[in-house]
Image (spheres, helix red, strand yellow):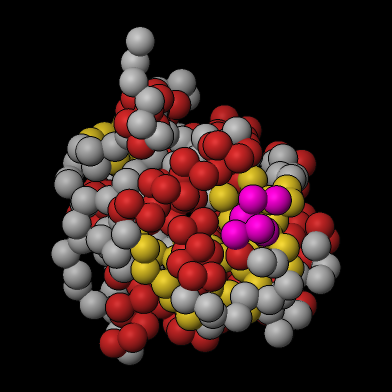
């Protein structure tokens, strides 16, 4: 697919429904890495996550009759909330399948919308497979959270904004699950500026995309529990994001659960921003690369991909106790 072209189409369709999120300079991260670090705050996007971009892009590309026919998504929460908002703006009928173990805050947000929620499976790939089967049986349209050109183009609108906000950008750190976010951002930015370096960041407990790229094929890998639920789980066979990651991502870095939590604490302590585990992965990846003395560049963006985390979980992470 032509990510650049798809992103431009998406930008035209969804720009009026989105918040252009700020790119904030991080004094503390800049000091720690001896360079200039900027945070792209998708945690304050509508719905609290970047996922609404891809959802809006896909739903807006469909006809009214296609939307009314019935749309299905599988999600650990953020894509589901983005999809629900897209349906609210654009109309249609939708069903959202979620794993049994999902952050309570994300379920609360989903329940605010007029969509059907179905719990199934213990892993996002298992949930996704079941949702596809149900969509086929009921003649509904399944929307992949990452393996879809319009979804990737929607996520690529972050790159569209980044290059406008920081034309001198030379490195970007992005969390990786199924690869839709990093494919969209990298595909757009590298078309504009091929010298930009893109680093994919993954939890050690679920590094499926990077292991697949290393193996040269999509592999089955049993993920362990991770605070980064938004990037956890497997990748469906034949996903277009795999070849895009092979082509566009310069390197991958794996981070531990403790490194993710430390990154979340750092952002809260220094920026007052509540971020979820998947966003912490990108910050942790930056810090790990810096500690390994890897060349980072002079102007670096870190994608803070979301902030949907329950207060109880967040309190445990930042070592606060309830009164």
Figure check: 99 above or below 169: above
Q: Is residue 276 visible?
A: yes
Figure check: 203 above or below 19: below
Counting from the top left corner in percent of width and height, residue 110 is at: 42, 29
Instruction: Name the residue located 58 percent from the left edge and 75 percent from the top edge.
Output: 198
Instruction: Name the residue located 17 percent from the left edge and 47 percent from the top edge.
Output: 122
- Give the magenta range: 27-32
Answer whether residue 30 is magenta in the image.
yes
Q: Quadrant of the C terminus?
A: top left
Figure check: 138 above or below 161: above
Instruction: Name the residue located 70 percent from the left edge and 51 percent from the top edge.
Output: 27
Magenta span main SS: helix
In the shown orientation, is residue 171 left or right of residue 265? right
Instruction: Name the residue located 44 percent from the left edge and 26 percent from the top edge.
Output: 109
Residue sticking out furthest to the bottom: 216
63, 34: nearer the viewer: 34
In the shown orientation, is residue 114 left or right of residue 248? left
Q: Is residue 51 visible?
A: no
Q: Quadrant of the N terminus?
A: bottom right
């Amino acid at each position: 697919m032509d990510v650049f072209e798809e992103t431009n189409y998406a930008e035209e369709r969804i720009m009026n429904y989105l918040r252009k999120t700020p790119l904030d300079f991080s004094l503390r991260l800049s000091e720690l890495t001896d360079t200039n670090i900027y945070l792209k705050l998708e945690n304050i996007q509508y719905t609290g996550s970047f996922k609404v971009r891809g959802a809006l892009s896909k739903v807006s590309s469909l006809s009214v009759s296609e939307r009314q026919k019935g749309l299905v998504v599988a999600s650990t929460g953020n894509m589901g909330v983005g999809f629900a908002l897209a349906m609210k703006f654009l109309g249609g009928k939708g069903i959202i399948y979620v794993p049994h173990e999902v952050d309570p805050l994300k379920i609360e947000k989903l329940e605010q919308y007029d969509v059907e929620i179905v719990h199934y499976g213990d892993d996002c790939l298992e949930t996704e497979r079941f949702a596809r089967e149900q969509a086929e049986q009921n003649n509904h349209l399944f929307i992949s959270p990452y393996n879809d050109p319009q979804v990737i183009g929607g996520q690529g609108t972050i790159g569209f904004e980044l290059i406008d906000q920081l034309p001198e950008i030379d490195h970007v750190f992005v969390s990786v699950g199924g690869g839709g976010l990093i494919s969209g951002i990298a595909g757009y930015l590298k078309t504009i500026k091929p010298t930009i370096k893109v680093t994919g960041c993954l939890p050690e407990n679920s590094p499926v995309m990077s292991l697949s790229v290393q193996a040269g094929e999509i592999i089955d890998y049993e993920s362990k529990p991770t605070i980064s639920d938004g990037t956890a789980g497997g990748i469906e066979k034949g996903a277009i994001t795999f070849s895009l990651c092979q082509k566009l991502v310069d390197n991958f870095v794996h981070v531990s659960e403790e490194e993710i939590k430390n990154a979340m604490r750092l952002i809260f302590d220094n920026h007052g921003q509540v971020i979820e585990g998947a966003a912490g992965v990108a910050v942790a990846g930056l810090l790990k690369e810096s500690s390994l003395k890897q060349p980072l560049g002079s102007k670096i963006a870190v994608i803070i991909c979301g902030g949907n985390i329950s207060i109880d979980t967040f309190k445990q992470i930042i070592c606060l106790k309830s009164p």
